[in-house]
């Protein structure tokens, strides 16, 4: 016997300012992030004089670091949640904030390098 589920409140979801703020924030952050990544090869070429043959390798290292960081952060957030007793929402906000601030800090360091 299949239990009947309540329908999703689509009208409330699609008219919620919180949903639009979240979509705007995520889209803006992601757009800026990918613009930086696509400009990275020309940055390496113009600032560090890295030849185009090596440029791809250094750009790929950035993506590799992102992948490793994502895998570590997922497991670390689960560990922090279990050990600290913090709610899932608090742990997600902490990790999201750290991730965004880390990128900003690295950009500042890269500009002043």
Image (spheres, grey):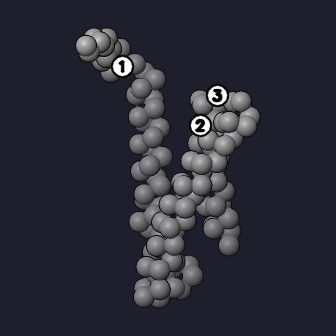
**Residue sitting at x 42%, y 88%:** 53
Q: Are marks 2 and 3 in contact (CB under 8 Å)?
A: no
Residue 41 left/right relative to 101: left
The residue beneath circle 3 is 87
The Cα–Cα distance between marks 1 and 3, rounded to whole angstroms, is: 23 Å
Looking at marks 2 and 1 on the same chain, the residue that comes earlier in the sequence is marked by 1
Q: Quadrant of residue 7?
A: top left
Disc 3: CA contacts within 10 A as few (<14), some (14-19) or many (>=20): few
Give the distance between the C-alpha atoms of the residues marked 2 and 1, in whole angstroms: 21 Å
Which one is earlier in the sequence, the residue at label 2 or at label 3? 3
Figure check: 97 above or below 62: above
From this view, report whether residue 47 is shown above or below residue 67. Answer: below
Label of residue 13 in the image: 1
Q: Which dot, 2 or 3, sits closer to the camera?
A: 3
| Sequence-first disc among 1 and 3 | 1
The percent coordinates of residue 100 (x first, y second) are 59, 48
- Reading the image, the residue beneath label 2 is 92
Q: Secondary structure at mark 3?
A: loop
Q: Left or right of 31: which side holds 61?
A: right
Q: Position of residue 36 (x, y in %)?
A: 47, 61
Residue 28 percent location from the top left of the image: 44, 44
Disc 1 element: helix
Q: Please name the residue shown 64% across and 48% down the image.
A: 76
Quarter of the figure with the N terminus: top left
């Amino acid at each position: 016997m299949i239990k009947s589920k309540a329908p999703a409140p689509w009208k409330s979801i699609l008219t919620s300012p919180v949903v639009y703020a979240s979509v705007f924030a995520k889209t803006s952050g992601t757009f800026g992030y990918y613009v930086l990544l696509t400009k990275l090869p020309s940055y390496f070429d113009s600032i560090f004089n890295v030849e185009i043959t090596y440029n791809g390798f250094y750009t790929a290292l950035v993506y590799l670091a992102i992948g490793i960081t994502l895998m570590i952060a997922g497991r670390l957030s689960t560990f922090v949640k279990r050990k600290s007793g913090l709610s899932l929402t608090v742990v997600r906000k902490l990790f999201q904030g750290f991730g965004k601030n880390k990128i900003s800090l690295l950009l500042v360091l890269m500009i002043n390098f």
